Amino acid sequence: MKELNALLHSQLRLAVMSILMNVADADFVYIKGITGATAGNLSVQLDKLSSAGYIEVKKEFVGKKPRTTCAITTLGREAFCEYVEALKEYIKL
Amino acid sequence: MEKEQFEEKESIELIADMIARTKHRLCIGDGNIMLLWGYLAVAVALLVWVLLVVLQHPAVNWLWFLIWIIGGSITPKLARKSRDKSGVTSYVDRVSNSVWSLVGWCSIIATFMCLGFMLFAAKDCWGVMMVFALLIVGMAEAVQGIVLQERSLIVGGAVGVVCGIFIMCCLVGGIMLYAHWCMPLFILAFVAMMIVPGHIINHKAKK
């Protein structure tokens, strides 16, 4: 039986990856709103996903406001698909 | 959502939940950009029509460029505002943006080509822009409607395509495009293509 990817087998990181699998890109506020996470926790988890190369984080200024936009990478997409396949084995779907 | 480890079954439920929550946003955006182009095209067409009747001078046709100038400068701002408001770009948005960017670039090329024919060959090809505005824009809108599964866009786009083909047949057949029938056709087509779907989309977005 395949082992579950430890990086993805965390509630918030998996939620972020699930959102980003479904959209081209999403900003920090949007992800925070959908997941209901705190800004600090979300920021830490985004850093972990970004360090693993699963997501791309772009920081920019819109007018005077900073904006963080996240998008899933090809590596992240593959990891997510593998994770779902492994999950299927675990729960015998 | 602070739990670090959780059950496999919960993972599936979480993925399904996140997909469902983002899916809601994918339904439809707002129709403000369509309304801008629709009302702008209709207003400029009315202005050109009235001035053509009153002044009887072909130079009035330069006013058509107002659609291009005003629409082209306001659209990026509206698009940016809409994107900032929603905080997300869906794949549908991306397809839609690409299609309309393509239409925009084609219109720039078509305009310069007509200008070139007028300046260097003394040929009036501006009727092509009428075909372009109806046929290509209608086609792009119908494609957007198919992607968004929005019937008003498909129907509006189809109206534009039919009107565009009609104008093209007139041009090829040497039938003069007189303002007294050409302008109302253009205005009606833009009402069907942009204004009606724009209001329907805004109404749905509000719901």
Image (cartoon, rainbow, N blue to C red):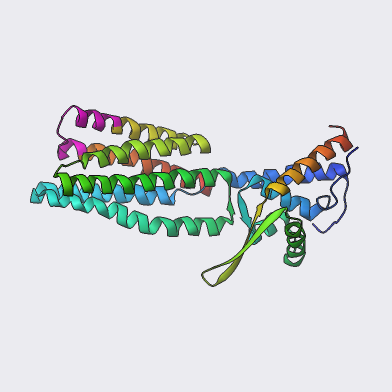
Q: Is residue B178 magenta?
A: yes
Q: Do we see residue B95 in this rendering?
A: yes
**Where, by quadrant of the figure, is residue B177 drawn?**
top left
Q: Is residue A59 magenta?
A: no
**Which residue is painted at 49% across and 58% down in the image?**
B80
- Residue A93, x across and y down, in percent: 83, 32
Q: What x and y, as percent, mark residue A3?
A: 89, 43
Q: Is residue B69 left or right of residue B62?
A: right
Q: Nearer the viewer, residue B21 or B103?
A: B103
The location of residue B28, given as percent across then percent down, is: 53, 44
In this image, A45 relative to B50: left or right?
right
Q: Nearer the viewer, residue A49 or B189?
A: A49
In the picture shown, does residue B164 fall above or below A8? above
The structure residue drawn at horizontal position 19% and vertical position 52%, both measured from the top left corner, is: B62
Q: Position of residue A37 (x, y in %)?
A: 75, 60
| B171 displayed left or right of B25 | left
**Res. B152 in view:** no
Q: Tell me the magenta residue range.
A: B165-182
| Residue located at (17% from left, 49% from top) | B119
Residue that appears at 31% across and 41% down: B133
Per the picture, the main secondary structure of the magenta-coloured stretch is helix
The part of the image, by quadrant, that contains residue A34 is: bottom right
